[in-house]
Image (spheres, helix red, strand yellow):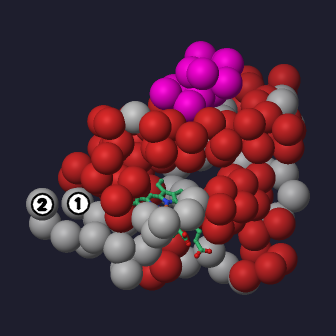
Amino acid sequence: MNVPLYQPEEAARHSTPFEWIGGEDKVHALVERFYDLMDLEPGYRELRAAHGSTLDNARQRLFWFLCGWMGGPQHYTERFGHPRLRMRHMPFAIGIQERDQWLACMDQAMGDTGVDAVLRERLGKSFFQTADWMRNTPA
Ligand code: HEM
């Protein structure tokens, strides 16, 4: 994603956002909570509807992707090469509503899994940049 996730003072305390968040177990818990919420919460209905009947594939791949994106193990690129997220999302209509539901769902998941408030805000800004860049329909 486009925006650096941490500034030098944080980098001095945590070598990567991956370490800061608490490693693979924490990223895994975050992704599980994210898709559980997407499944459960009426406020994310349109986002859920854009996905297939099962979220299993998405759970696995977002976990792999986020580990690498946060500076941890490159599970995703080892398996699939460059993420090319915008291209991979072209089959799904992403407008303002889907973008905002994705971001709200992720923010709620970060809150529920106890992500540090400073990191949560920084990740939120970076998620916004990427989700906004992935919009491919006007509405
Ligand atoms: C920052 C925002 C987002 C990130 C980081 C992200 C990340 C990902 C990743 C890594 C995958 C797996 C890609 C693959 O290997 O095929 C994926 C799949 C997917 N994403 Fe996103 N995504 C974002 C936003 C969205 C939004 C706004 C939508 C709304 C429609 C969406 C819908 C989907 C769907 C439908 C899949 C396919 C799931 C499946 O294969 O079952 N994503 N996303």
Whether label 1 touches label 2, CB < 8 Å: yes
Look at the image and tell me whether residue 122 can be seen: no
Looking at the rendered structure, which numbered label has been put on residue 139?
2
For label 1, the SS is: loop
Q: Quick check: is 118 in the magenta stretch?
A: yes
Picture coordinates of residue 98, whole percent (x, y): 30, 53
Q: Is residue 114 left or right of residue 107?
A: right
Residue occupying image coordinates x 28% and y 70%: 93
Residue for point 74% across, 26% down: 10
- The answer to whether 134 appears left or right of 26 in the picture is left
Q: Nearer the viewer, residue 32 or 96?
A: 32
Q: Which range is magenta?
A: 108-122
Is 111 above or below relative to 75?
above
Quadrant containing the N terminus in the rendered view: bottom right
Residue at x-position 39% and y-position 54%: 48
Question: Which residue type carries mark 1?
Answer: Gly
Q: Secondary structure at mark 2?
A: loop
What number is the disc on residue 70? none
Q: Say which label, 1 or 2, has the lower sequence index.
A: 1
Label 1, on which residue?
95
Q: Position of residue 44 (x, y in %)?
A: 35, 42
Give how far apart the Cα atoms at labels 1 and 2 are: 5 Å
Indicate the quadrant where residue 56 lies: bottom right
Task: Left or right? Give the position of 25 relative to 81.
Answer: right
Q: Please check the rendered image and state whether residue 67 is part of the magenta-colored stretch, yes or no.
A: no
